[in-house]
Image: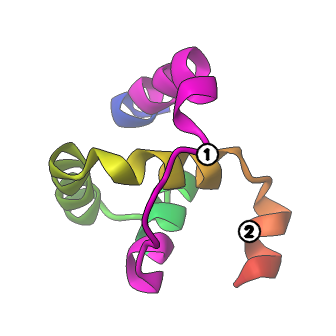
Amino acid sequence: MNETFQILAGFLDKFSDDVVGHAREDIPADLRARLRDFAQGTLDDAERARLCLSMKENPQWIPALAMEARTPRGERDAAR
């Protein structure tokens, strides 16, 4: 597992109860798709770096990422 995902996994393990379910705004479909791809590990390095920077600037997106990371892959695929 690369370092970015290890950091994310550690964060979610430690703070997931505090993070999940606190989003207050709807996330655009294109951003939600990028978060889903990030959670699945399918973004290329450049896109992942851009998304990480955007998430630092928009911490309100973290709960959506947490939900994507916690959703079993089969359920994510069915939602597409």
* Cβ–Cβ under 8 Å for marks 2 and 1: no
Residue 56 included in the magenta stretch of the image: no
Decide if residue 65 is on the left or right side of residue 77. Answer: left
1, 62: nearer the viewer: 62
What's the residue type where badge 2 is placed?
Arg
Residue at image coords 77%, 59%: 73
Residue at image coords 38%, 54%: 61
Residue underneath mark 1: 21
Considering the image in quadrants, where does the C terminus appear? bottom right
Q: Measuring from the top left, give residue 42's x and y in whole percent.
A: 48, 63
Query: Which stretch is magenta?
Result: 6-33
Residue underneath mark 2: 76
Decide if residue 49 is on the left or right side of residue 48. Answer: left
Q: Measuring from the top left, give residue 9's x and y in whole percent.
A: 53, 28
What's the residue type where badge 1 is placed?
Gly
Q: Measuring from the top left, give residue 13's x and y in whole percent.
A: 60, 20
76, 42: nearer the viewer: 76
Residue 60: mark:
none
Residue 18 included in the magenta stretch of the image: yes
| Nearest-to-viewer mark from 2 and 1 | 1
63, 75: nearer the viewer: 63
Image vertical order of residue 3 relative to residue 58, above or below: above
Q: Measuring from the top left, give residue 22's x and y in whole percent.
A: 53, 44
> Dot 1, crowdedness within 10 Å: few (<14), some or many (≥20)?
few
Residue at image coords 50%, 46%: 63
User: Which of the marked residues, 2 or 1, is nearer the chain's N terminus?
Assistant: 1
Decide if residue 63 is on the left or right side of residue 4. Answer: right
Residue at image coords 26%, 58%: 51
